[in-house]
Amino acid sequence: VLRRMGDDILEFRTREFRQLCKEMMTIMYQASGVGLAAPQVGLSTRLFVYNHLGDPDSSNFERIVCNPKILEYSEEVDVENEGCLSSRSGCCMGPVSRSVSIMVEYKTEEGSLVRRRLTGFEARVFQHEYDHIEGIL
């Protein structure tokens, strides 16, 4: 599941889908993470959740991202160490180059289309989780 591209979410607003999103957010916080993609919990779907602050008390920064696309990457990049909840050992932590700004489009858990420009750490988190649903570790 971690090495294959996820399938699009086709049904929104179901009780099961809302419960899945809630459970993924809970798992992310319990693991002290800032993002979690569906393939990391054994599901081959184009879904991830994140809160770039990593603080459950800052729920207004929580994002549920369905069927995302990165429309534009900035030429400017930075390199920072990244870890991953897929591997809790230090073997998978290391420097990763990411665009500092991206233009993204995705659907919310309600199926509403969102288009946003993300910068800084939020852009980094989005790109990391996006890699997971693209089958990239």
Image (cartoon, grey):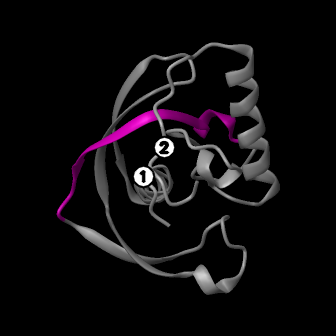
Q: Is residue 84 left or right of residue 127?
A: right
Q: Secondary structure at mark 1?
A: loop
Q: Is residue 13 left or right of residue 131?
A: right
Q: Are marks 1 and 2 in contact (CB under 8 Å)?
A: yes
Which residue is the site of mark 2?
6
Query: How far is the residue under mark 1 from the one under mark 2?
Result: 6 Å
Magenta stretch bounds:
58-75
> Residue at the left extreme?
75
Name the foreground residue: 56 vs 97. Answer: 97
- What residue sits 67% from the left and 13% below the top? 14
| Residue 74 quadrant | bottom left
Is residue 27 visible to the viewer in this orientation of the structure?
yes
Is residue 37 visible to the viewer in this orientation of the structure?
no
Which residue type carries mark 2?
Answer: Gly
27 up-or-down from 88: above or below: above
- What residue sits 61% from the left and 45% below the top? 38
> Residue at the right extreme?
30
Which residue is the site of mark 1?
134
Image spot of residue 93 (x, y percent): 57, 81
Q: Secondary structure at mark 2?
A: loop
Image spot of residue 87 (x, y percent): 67, 72
Image spot of residue 133 (x, y percent): 48, 49
Q: Is residue 121 left or right of residue 50?
A: left
| Residue 115 quadrant | top left
Residue 77 — which label? none
Going from N to C along the chain, the mark reached first, 1 or 2, is 2
Main SS type for the magenta part? Answer: strand
Which residue type carries mark 1?
Answer: Glu
